[in-house]
Image: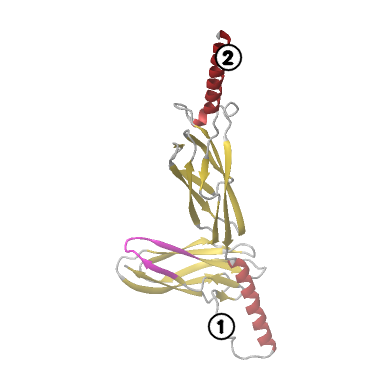
């Protein structure tokens, strides 16, 4: 009888130890509604955001130790670092498409573990209390406008057209090409027109005109003249080289309501006639 009581006591102690061990080392259960998001087609230099939702389906609190993007172009923002059993949370991911082109994939590595009360999750010994990892994927197709390549191509087409008409003894000037560029000999300006759209009175709106050189001879922006109310212009980059664009910036700062228009005349080195770019906006 005494032996049976001892065996029963030992069994009860072993069950208690096993239960305590399993409770202390229960694996955290963090579930995300989705593990990947595709932004689809986005513009180069755009800011894109997506929110991943998750839930603690375990029996113990979970600490999200870190949400680490693969590069500085991506950032993660948590609604809460500690998630109680049955609670949900959100993680907002921001992706800056910057200078990316075509297909892009970025990863955010999420590290988490069972919460230890009263201890900062970032100060816990990783070797003693290892974290679990989960990867969130972001896909996108970044569309970009290669203005320089298009400008060079247009310049070559115009030069070829003029050469053919000259050889044929044409007396009239070639008809102007319908395009998004203002041209002047070997210099191509983009865009052909600056439209500022609607601007609130008292605020500034800035846009740039860029100049591409289709010849091997260096050129430069020598002078600019602006004929438009409540607007100013400045030379940002004077030199126009083969592989380096020049730039003029136009700033509109309306002080009264109405629709306004004008033009910017840009004089380049070695030319008497300017490149004219119309500008327009509506002030509200």
**Residue drawn at (36%, 73%) of the image:** 260
Q: Position of residue 46 (x, y in %)?
A: 51, 58
Placement of 20 over or under 148, stated as above or below:
above
Distance Cα–Cα, label 1 vs label 2 = 103 Å
Q: As drawn, which residue projects farthest toward the right?
A: 167
Q: Is residue 174 left or right of residue 248?
A: right
Frontmost residue, 199 versus 214 = 199
Q: Secondary structure at mark 1?
A: loop
**Residue 202 is a magenta residue:** yes
Q: Is residue 283 left or right of residue 15?
A: left
Which segment did they paint magenta? 195-208
**Residue drawn at (52%, 21%) of the image:** 16
Q: Position of residue 113 (x, y in %)?
A: 53, 34
**Badge 1: residue crowd in 10 Å (few <14, some 14–19, many ≥20):** few
**Badge 2: residue crowd in 10 Å (few <14, some 14–19, many ≥20):** few
Instruction: Return the residue at label 1.
Output: 176
| Badge number at residue 255 | none
Instruction: Return the residue at label 2.
Output: 7
Q: Position of residue 2 (x, y in %)?
A: 55, 8
Placement of 62 over or under 6, stated as above or below:
below
Frontmost residue, 33 versus 138 = 33
Observer able to see residue 219: no
Q: Quadrant of residue 220?
A: bottom right
Observer able to see residue 246: yes
Q: Position of residue 117 (x, y in %)?
A: 45, 27
**Residue drawn at (70%, 87%) of the image:** 167
Q: Main secondary structure of the magenta part?
A: strand
């Amino acid at each position: 009888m005494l032996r049976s009581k001892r065996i029963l006591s030992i069994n009860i102690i072993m069950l208690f130890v096993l239960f305590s061990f399993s409770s202390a080392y229960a694996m955290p259960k963090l579930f995300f509604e989705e593990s990947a998001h595709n932004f689809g087609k986005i513009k180069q230099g755009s800011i894109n955001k997506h929110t991943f939702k998750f839930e603690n389906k375990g029996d113990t609190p979970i600490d999200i130790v870190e949400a680490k993007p693969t590069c500085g172009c991506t950032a993660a923002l948590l609604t809460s670092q500690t998630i109680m059993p049955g609670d949900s949370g959100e993680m907002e991911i921001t992706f800056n498409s910057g200078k990316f082109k075509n297909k892009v994939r970025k990863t955010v590595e999420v590290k988490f573990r069972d919460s230890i009360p009263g201890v900062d999750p970032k100060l816990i010994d990783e070797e003693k209390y290892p974290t679990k990892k989960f990867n969130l994927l972001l896909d996108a197709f970044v569309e970009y406008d290669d203005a320089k390549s298009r400008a060079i191509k247009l310049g070559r087409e115009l030069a070829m057209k003029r050469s053919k008409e000259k050889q044929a003894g044409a007396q009239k000037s070639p008809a102007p090409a319908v395009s998004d560029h203002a041209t002047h000999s070997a210099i191509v300006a983009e865009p052909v027109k600056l439209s500022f759209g609607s601007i609130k009175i008292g605020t500034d709106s800035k846009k740039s005109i860029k100049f591409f050189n289709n010849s091997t001879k260096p050129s430069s922006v020598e002078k600019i003249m602006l004929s438009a109310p409540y607007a100013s212009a400045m030379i940002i980059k004077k030199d126009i080289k083969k592989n380096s664009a020049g730039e003029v910036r136009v700033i509109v700062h309306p002080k009264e309501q109405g629709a306004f228009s004008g033009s910017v005349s840009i004089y380049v080195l070695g030319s008497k006639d300017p490149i004219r770019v119309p500008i327009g906006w509506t002030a509200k």
